[in-house]
């Protein structure tokens, strides 16, 4: 009986340790954006993680999947982010140049107050669609560690290029878009 | 009389908690909420979003919101990760249960081991072999010479 009890206790201890390890691995992998950034770094074209988020202006939601068939400039930002204030006018002007040419710009506001984000869009007269991700649920999946970051997606929703940090010239944006529009 | 004392004591303890809920202070809220970017409590963070949250808290306190209302508004914007203490529901229950279960389990294991070791020691005492009778007789003779 003693030996059986000891065996049962050992089995229970091992099960608890394995369960906790499994939880740790799941938490790390689930939040990891390595499949995007890692794949990009090694020359791959990973599928952009999908999302459906509420629009910041107007009602309803925007699903990333609805942009299939067009190249996408996907910009992650927050109103409290200083470099975001510098790059937003550049993004808006680029949007106006590329609109109607098979390109769509989408902004994702994260870890921010909804009201502050809307004021930001009004202040910089942003007209491309923006969505709200207050909890930052998209950030881990894209491997984002800071704001701003911009991803360029092709018509099939694959990430072809990424700019970590602010875009500083229109030429940078154009180069990313041209990569996204180029045939695979 | 005892009952009155208990009721008065309970009210005395509850009063500060009620006051804190109805008229919270910025410092207590800042210690109970976390910056969503740097994950430090607001009172120790100077991140831009933390500063913005502190300003929001002060504005909502001035508007007369309760502690629960302010926390609820911030959770609605940033998610439950903004709470310094995880809520007691759903998956977050693990954060509450696991440490206590671990401590309880550890105490049980230590207690069981200590009990077993003490049993082993008692059994060990009982297992001392008796002396050889001839040796015991010679020992007694030697000891009696010393008296």
Image (cartoon, rainbow, N blue to C red):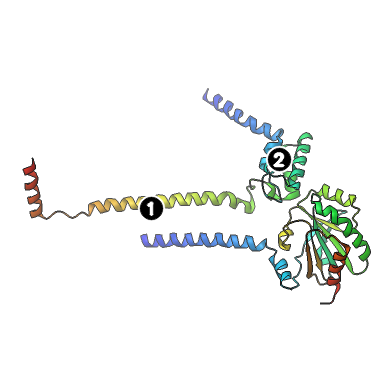
Q: Earlier in the sequence, mark 1 or mark 2?
A: 2
Give the vertical position of A102 relative to B98 (above or below). below
- Please tell me in which quadrant of the rendered image residue B129 appears: bottom left
- Please tell me in which quadrant of the rendered image residue A155 appears: bottom right
Q: Are marks 1 and 2 in contact (CB under 8 Å)?
A: no
In this orientation, which residue lies closer to the viewer: B15 or B51?
B51
Give the vertical position of B112 relative to A142 (above or below). above
Kindly give the residue lying farthest to the top in the view shown: B1
Q: Dot 1, crowdedness within 10 Å: few (<14), some or many (≥20)?
A: few
Helix, strand or loop at disc 2? helix
Quadrant in the picture for the N terminus of chain A: bottom left
The chain that hosts pointer 2 is B
Tell me the tag on residue B68.
2
Percent position (x, y) of residue A54?
81, 56
In this orientation, which residue lies closer to the viewer: A164 or B62?
A164
Disc 1: which residue: B113
Give the vertical position of A158 relative to A141 (above or below). below
Residue at horizontal 87 percent and vertical 52 percent from the top: A121
Percent position (x, y) of residue A70?
86, 69
């Amino acid at each position: 009986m003693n030996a059986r009890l000891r065996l049962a206790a050992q089995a229970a201890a091992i099960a608890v340790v394995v369960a906790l390890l499994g939880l740790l691995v799941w938490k790390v992998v689930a939040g990891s954006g390595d499949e995007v950034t890692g794949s990009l770094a090694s020359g791959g074209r990973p599928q952009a993680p999908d999302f459906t988020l509420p629009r910041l202006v107007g009602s309803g939601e925007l699903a990333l999947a609805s942009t299939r068939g067009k190249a996408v400039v996907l910009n992650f930002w927050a109103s409290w982010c200083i470099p975001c204030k510098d790059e937003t006018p550049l993004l808006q002007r680029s949007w106006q140049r590329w609109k109607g040419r098979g390109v769509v710009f989408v902004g994702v506001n994260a870890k921010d107050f909804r009201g502050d984000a809307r004021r930001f869009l009004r202040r910089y007269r942003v007209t491309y669609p923006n969505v709200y991700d207050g909890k930052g649920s998209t950030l881990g999946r894209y491997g984002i560690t800071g704001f701003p970051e911009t991803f360029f997606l092709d018509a099939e929703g694959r990430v072809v290029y990424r700019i970590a940090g602010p875009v500083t010239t229109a030429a940078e944006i154009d180069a990313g878009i041209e990569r996204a529009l180029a045939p695979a | 009389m005892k009952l009155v004392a208990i009721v008065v004591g309970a009210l005395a303890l509850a009063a500060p908690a009620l006051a804190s809920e109805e008229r919270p202070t910025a410092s207590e809220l800042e210690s109970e909420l976390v910056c969503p970017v740097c994950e430090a409590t607001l009172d120790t963070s100077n991140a831009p979003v933390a500063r913005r949250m502190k300003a929001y808290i002060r504005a909502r306190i001035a508007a007369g919101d309760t502690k629960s209302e302010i926390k609820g508004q911030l959770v609605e914007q940033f998610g439950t990760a903004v709470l310094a203490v995880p809520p007691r529901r759903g998956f977050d229950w693990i954060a509450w249960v696991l440490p206590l279960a671990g401590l309880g389990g550890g105490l049980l294991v230590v207690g069981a081991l200590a009990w077993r070791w003490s049993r082993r020691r008692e059994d060990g005492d009982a297992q001392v072999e008796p002396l050889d009778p001839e040796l015991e007789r010679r020992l007694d003779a030697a000891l009696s010479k010393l008296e």
